[in-house]
Image (cartoon, rainbow, N blue to C red):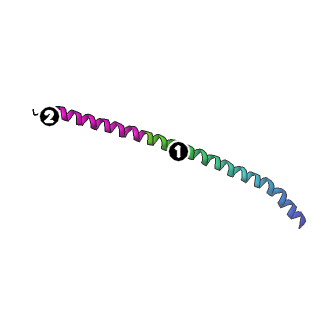
Amino acid sequence: MIGLVTVVMIFSIPIIGILTSHFEKQAKTKHNMIKDELELEKLKHENFLIETEKMRLELDQMKFGESKDEPKLL
């Protein structure tokens, strides 16, 4: 019985080390994925702001063009 416990204890240490290493690698990979997703979301937000500003400028330009075409009454 003591021999069996000894063998289990001896082989459990490397197995625990392997599992711990695996979980650390998974956590690092997940961290990198989240960091990349955050960067992507920042770029999407920046793109949204740029497109919104562009549309606002185009709308202002259209309004300015329409007001130039209308005849003015004196």
Q: Which residue is mark 1?
A: 38
3D distance between C-alphas at marks 1 and 2:
48 Å
Q: Which residue is mark 2?
A: 70
Q: What is the magenta segment's predominant secondary structure?
A: helix
Task: Note whether 18 is above or below 5 in the view shown.
Answer: above
Q: Is residue 58 left or right of residue 67?
A: right
Percent coordinates x, y for residue 14 in the rendering = 79, 53
Task: Note whether 71 is above or below 5 in the view shown.
Answer: above
Q: Is residue 68 left or right of residue 26?
A: left
For the C terminus, give its image quadrant. Answer: top left
SS at badge 2 = loop
The reply to whether the magenta stretch includes residue 67 is yes
Task: Note whether 72 is above or below 1 in the view shown.
Answer: above
Percent coordinates x, y for residue 30 in the rendering = 60, 48
Percent coordinates x, y for residue 68 in the rendering = 18, 31
Name the one closer to the observer, 69 or 21: 69
Name the one closer to the observer, 55 or 5: 55
SS at badge 1 = helix
Q: How many marks?
A: 2
Q: Is residue 45 left or right of residue 11?
A: left
- Residue found farthest to the left: 74
- Residue found farthest to the bottom: 1
Chain part drawn in magenta = 47-74
Q: Which mark is residue 5?
A: none
Mark nearer the N terminus (1 vs 2) = 1
Q: Residue at x 85, y 60 (%)?
A: 7
Percent coordinates x, y for residue 50 in the rendering = 39, 37
Tell me the amino acid under the disc marked 1.
Leu
Which mark lies nearer to you, 1 or 2? 2
* Residue 58: quadrant of the picture: top left
Q: Residue at x 82, y 56 (%)?
A: 11
Tell me the amino acid under the disc marked 2.
Glu
